[in-house]
């Protein structure tokens, strides 16, 4: 059978068949990564099912996993918690660092970042007494200030 005749056949004009054919080619070409990902997912699920007590404890323990955050974000959280701050601002330098900005917003929840808040978290190197803010508390890398 000639190639031209094969391409003109109605069987190749079916969109579902074309999509299935492309999917099969994709799976054959990328089979090792897919198998590895599925294996890891099943292994992780099996581990969680066999160690359910540990898994459940990690879900219900407050502040679990915060040790994985950058040290400056851990300090920011400690300042917000110790002074019971409900809303806060962050300095421009922290705002520009997307890693720190994202981590403090997600880990400080339900505390919210708000432009109207008088409390501001800044790096110690940014603190300037003439800025109209007074220092409330400080850690090694960051400080909590109250701005008027």
Image (spheres, rainbow, N blue to C red):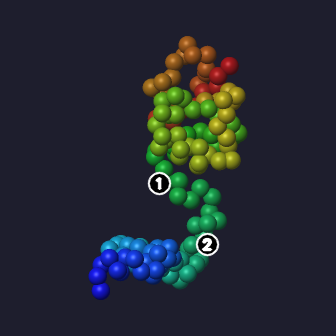
Question: Quadrant location of the C terminus?
Answer: top right
Residue displayed at 55% across by 40% down: 76
Q: Which is nearer the N-term, disc 1 or disc 2?
A: 2
Is residue 44 visible from the viewing direction of this image?
no
SS under mark 1: helix
Image quarter of residue 120: top right
Task: Say which residue appears at 46% left-offset and 80% top-offset.
Answer: 10
Residue 40 quadrant: bottom left
Image location (x, y in percent) of residue 57: 60, 70
Q: Residue at x 30, y 86 (%)?
A: 1
> Is residue 147 or residue 24 the one in the foreground?
24
Q: Position of residue 123 (x, y in %)?
A: 49, 30
For this rendering, which residue is in front, 33 or 49? 33
Q: Which residue is mark 1?
A: 68
Q: Is residue 84 left or right of residue 11?
A: right
Q: Give the side of residue 30 with respect to residue 82, left or right.
A: left
Seen as rendered, the residue at the extreme left is: 2
Image side of residue 12 versus residue 135, left or right: left
Residue 99 visible at all: yes
Residue 135 found in image quarter: top right
Q: Residue furthest bottom?
A: 1
Question: In x, y percent, where is residue 108?
Answer: 62, 46
Q: Nearer the viewer, residue 40 or 91?
A: 40
Residue 89, relative to residue 78: is it above or below?
above
Circle 1 packing at 10 Å, graded few (<14), some (14-19), many (20+), is few
- Tell me the CA gap for discs 1 and 2: 19 Å
Q: Label 2: how many residues lie within 10 Å, few (<14), some (14-19) or many (20+)?
A: few
Task: Residue under label 2, please give it.
Answer: 56
Q: Residue at x 64, y 22 (%)?
A: 147
């Amino acid at each position: 059978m000639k190639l031209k005749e094969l391409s003109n056949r109605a069987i190749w004009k079916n969109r579902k068949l074309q999509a299935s054919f492309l999917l099969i080619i994709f799976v054959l070409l990328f089979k090792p990564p897919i198998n590895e990902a599925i294996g890891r997912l099943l292994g992780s699920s099996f581990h969680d099912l066999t160690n359910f007590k540990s898994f459940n404890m990690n879900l219900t323990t407050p502040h679990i996993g915060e040790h994985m955050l950058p040290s400056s974000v851990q300090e920011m959280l400690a300042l917000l918690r110790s002074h019971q701050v409900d809303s806060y601002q962050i300095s421009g330098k922290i705002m520009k660092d997307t890693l720190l900005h994202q981590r403090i917003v997600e880990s400080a929840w339900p505390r919210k970042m708000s432009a109207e808040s008088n409390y501001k978290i800044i790096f110690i190197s940014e603190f300037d007494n003439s800025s109209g803010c007074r220092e409330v508390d400080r850690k090694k890398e960051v400080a909590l200030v109250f701005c008027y």
